Image (cartoon, rainbow, N blue to C red):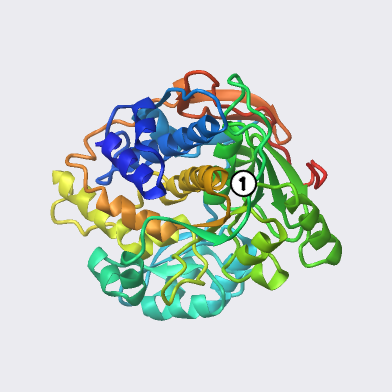
Amino acid sequence: MPGDVLASLWQLAGLPGDALACAHLTGTDPVYPSSFAVATAAQSTIAAAALAACELAHARGVPRQQVAVDATHAAAECLGWFSVDGRVPEAWDKFSGLYRARDGHVRIHANFAHHREGALRLLGLDPEQADRAAAEQAMLHWDALAFEDAAAGQGLVATALRSFAQWDASPQGQALAAQPLFTITRIGDADPLPLPALDAQQRPLAGVRVLDLTRILAGPVGGRALAAYGADVMLVNAPHLPNIEAIADTSRGKRSALLDLRTDDGRRGMAALLADAHVFVQGYRPGALQALGFAPEALAARRPGIVCVSLSAYGMQGPWHSRRGFDSLVQTAMGFNLAEGEAAHASDAAKAGEPVRPRPLPMQILDQATGYLIAFAAAAALWRQQREGGSWHVQVSLAQTGHWIRKLGRVPDGFAVTPPDLQPFLETTASGYGALRALRHSALLSRTPAGWIRPSAPPGSSPPRW
């Protein structure tokens, strides 16, 4: 049941159990066609994030408040649907997707030009001339695992299609199974960081300053949630790195600045921001920020009492700990696409005798749930910091979230459902990108409604200062 799932998250974070009486969860799976409990994953992580923000506010001296989350609204929010000036962006590049290999299937993520061009060159094709048909033909000459390894060796993003059993037998699957959903670890000594006085009518994270160094969905969703609960979130982009169009949606509520940490000026700018920050969230490839002097331990030395959040694709342990990855690829590698395809096939008598077609989950729930876990664990770590002092390190990954979703169990008759209408959950606001139509936040706070004060704006719209 969703309430039990929320309680288990709450216990893992070490938060006081009596706060759970303030949570009200309605509805249940299925909401969207799936054999997995994607609505429960959405609802429980969103409720956990909102309730933890309210519990931190309670620790700052204001009364607790009620938090209600409906499964249908939560699942709809995790679709990540939006439009700008009436245009719904294309979700995928034409070269992204599943390809048949000599002995199986491979999924390629090609939404960024350098990933697309690298994958096409690996296939022996000219990126300027190739089309999808040529790429599909070229992949037939590869074994799936061989292409996966070759792509990883070149820093590209592609994974072979696996079953759950194959993933569980792999070294990374075994390493992942030994890890909890997330960790909150004390990494240094410090006094409790002073937070501004909080009025009962202010949103629960008012006065909390968050540096958001993330770009691809999970991290930005986490920062957006913290902003919805009142945190002052500064999205810090590197001017040389690309973004996806979803930034128009995920940067709601945030300042948006540019800093190049490869330069002395950029590092000085980040040090100045860090001096007054409470949370530092980063989703760069493991080791990338360490080389620039911004590893968690270095951050704790510069800003004692900081809460650092590290996001990765496949976890911090195991042979894949440094591999790049996105939600769609992690679903493929871990067995979700094959399991979902088998369940959909079994549910449709008309498909009897046809081959099973691998099928993605109905939303990028690994990204979305991980984003809300970032907000939840960051608020939980801040709660500990206020009570115990210390500097803290939160670690989450898409694959750990996937492993947790598997453990939520399967949904009987999960495909016998009609997707809900999105219209009741949508709102239109002005933004720096145009008229943004997107999902309202699904956590309803009884005293201080969640929402975004700042409109989303392109990178560099704000100066890099609080």
Q: Which image quarter: residue 291? A: bottom right
Please tell me which residue is depicted at 78% across the width and 57% down the height of the picture.
Answer: 271
Look at the picture and state if 155 lies above or below 85.
below
The residue wearing badge 1 is 192
Label 1 Cα neighbours within 10 Å, binned few <14 / some 14-19 / many ≥20:
some
> Percent position (x, y) of residue 44?
36, 38
Residue 382 position by quadrant: top right
| The C terminus sits in image quarter | top right
Q: Residue at the spot x=36%, y=55% of the render?
A: 402
Quarter of the figure that contains the N terminus? top left
Residue furthest to the right in view is 265
Q: Can residue 141 be seen in this view?
A: no
Q: Establish if 301 lies above or below 404.
A: below
Left or right of residue 366: residue 37: left
In-front residue for pair 413/235 = 235
Q: Position of residue 353 (x, y in %)?
A: 14, 56
Badge 1 element: loop
Reply above or below: 29 against 186.
Answer: above
Image x and y of residue 459, in percent: 74, 46
Would residue 25 be found to the left or right of residue 349 on screen? right
Along the viewing direction, whichever of 320 and 35 lies nearer the viewer: 320
Which quadrant holds residue 250?
top right
State how many labels appear. Answer: 1
Residue at image coords 19%, 56%:
354
User: Tag 1: residue type?
Assistant: Pro
Residue 272 is at least partly visible in this image: yes
